[in-house]
Amino acid sequence: MEVINFARANCKNCYKCVRNCPVKAIKVRDGQAEIVFERCITCGTCLINCPQNAKTVKSDIEKVHEILKEEKVAVSLAPSFAGVFNDISPEDFIQTLKEFGFKNIFPTSYGAILIAKSYANYYNDRQRSIIISSACPASNYLIQKYYPELVPFLIPVVSPMIAHGKYLKKVKGYSKVIFIGPCLAKKMEAQEFQGVIDAVVTFEEIKKLFEGKGMVSEEEKKEQEKQIISIKDEAALYPVPGETIKTFAPYLKERWRKEISVDGVNELIEIFEEIKKGYLKDLYIEANACKGGCSNGPATGDKNKDKFIKLEKIKDFAAKIKNNYDFRESSEELHIGEFSKKFEAIKIIKKMPTEEEIRNILKKIGKYSKKDELNCGACGYDSCREKAIAVYNGMAEIYMCMPYMRARAESISGLIIDSTPNAIIAVNKKMEIQEFNPAAEKMFNKSKEEIIGMPLNYLFDDSDFRFVANFKENIIAKKVKLPDYGLTTLQSIYFLNDHDLIIGIISDITKQEEDRIRNIEIKKKTLETTQQVIEKQMRVAQEIASVLGETTAETKMLLNKIKNILKGELPDE
């Protein structure tokens, strides 16, 4: 039954959808927003307000392509098209639909005429103190799920879309009916009435179909002047707030009720709360979940722009054709019972934590008392307690608290900056010092209070910082001597484009440099000593070799003498 949700890859942890959802039907898990179908009223507010356009909507376009292959297919067209597609004439729009295969087009508002007598009957019933229109499925779901005690006030009649679908199939003999309109909740409603509406296509989807489509010719426009008469939009003002009663007014015995038109979910919630308190009676409420009525639906594809222009275009369209029809002459070919609908409460399971459990959740994000509860609404909930209850019900994550996470991040980053042994200096483009951490205070023997706002060259030559500021090229690990301080430093300088700051991280390597120079001297002396030893050893070796050479020659000579003597003393053989 799910028709809308969010694309995982696009969700950016902004919680804007949670903030704008009037019934808090959005769960956040692992930083990802997800619509909980059981709680959702399909108003589409979250999708309209999503800055990343991270929406996914169940589309019937593929199904429509298959349906259009059949012979007897009718299109029920919502009258709000005249406002949504206000950049072309109604005739052009209808003709373009026909070119895309939507041949048999009829106004959904004829369904309003079909249910007019039923509405009038409930209006005339003085036993009913309060009656609420039931044409808007999103407002119906709001009552069924969140105001179950008001369900008896809903007029138990189907919407114009469903009435029209039944009429087109049972009276006109069409095998399939496609609804085209601005509403996401109609996709849900169509699923409730399987076999009545076979596919729901939004205006946003139609706009995508129309992309790249050229305007019709003058000859076609002349033909359209005739075709517009076939679009019998008897109740074309239905999408305009406050105008629906005109559809069934001819059947009223007496307009004895106070009549209130309410558009927008938050406004509906306000009046429903007043009804619960018993403040209102003898009332007819025209309930519309969309601010500005159906022409401002969540699936128009224009983020609710030009609301009043759209309403005026709808009124112009209605004025053009209103004299063609008599409201009293609606079809009697369907029994009035065909249009009845039984509304029932839909139970939402919501667990209520104890006060101790709420306090324990709040303590985990540093809220130990009432004064710690800022109720800033950044998480999407109106109060810290509401958010804690959402956490308890698995609808929110505990660390969605922006002030807590910011304080925590600042605390950690501040701890790192204050604890690092490296000097950190931040300057603006004017080379004025903006940040000076404790290590910098120690390195330059200056307090933060006296140095903030001072020019950097007050401390040392700022040419490297200026180079980074002007050319936006970072300098990494450059050795810089600061003779005024007796220091040798290693400096890394970064340009932060988003903040127009230049950050210098300066490491004191004076001792390492002294050790390095000392090691070089030791190596030099070692090398000299080694060279001297080598040379001495060579001399000794040469002297030894010389002595050994003389001794060997003398020995050889003596041995030969002995040999010769011995040879001479031996007898002849």
Image (spheres, helix red, strand yellow):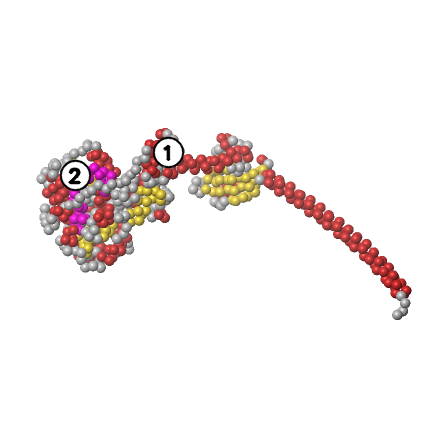
Q: Which residue is mark 1?
A: 360
Report which quarter residue 487 is drawn in.
top right
Q: Nearer the viewer, residue 566 or 287?
A: 566
Residue density around tag 2, few if under 14, some if 14–19, many if 20 or more, within 10 Å: many
Span shown in magenta: 141-165
Q: Quadrant of the C terminus?
A: bottom right
Label annotation for residue 131: 2
Q: Amino acid at mark 1?
A: Asn
Q: Is residue 109 left or right of residue 7?
A: left
Label annotation for residue 42: none
Report which quarter residue 254 is drawn in.
top left
Give the SS element for disc 2.
Answer: strand
Q: Amino acid at mark 2?
A: Ile
Residue 192, x across and y down, in percent: 21, 48
How far apart marks 2 and 1 lie (CA) works out to: 44 Å
Residue 508, x across and y down, in percent: 56, 38
Write the residue at 27% across / 42% down. 39
On screen, residue 490 above or below 571: above
Write the residue at 77% across / 52% down. 541
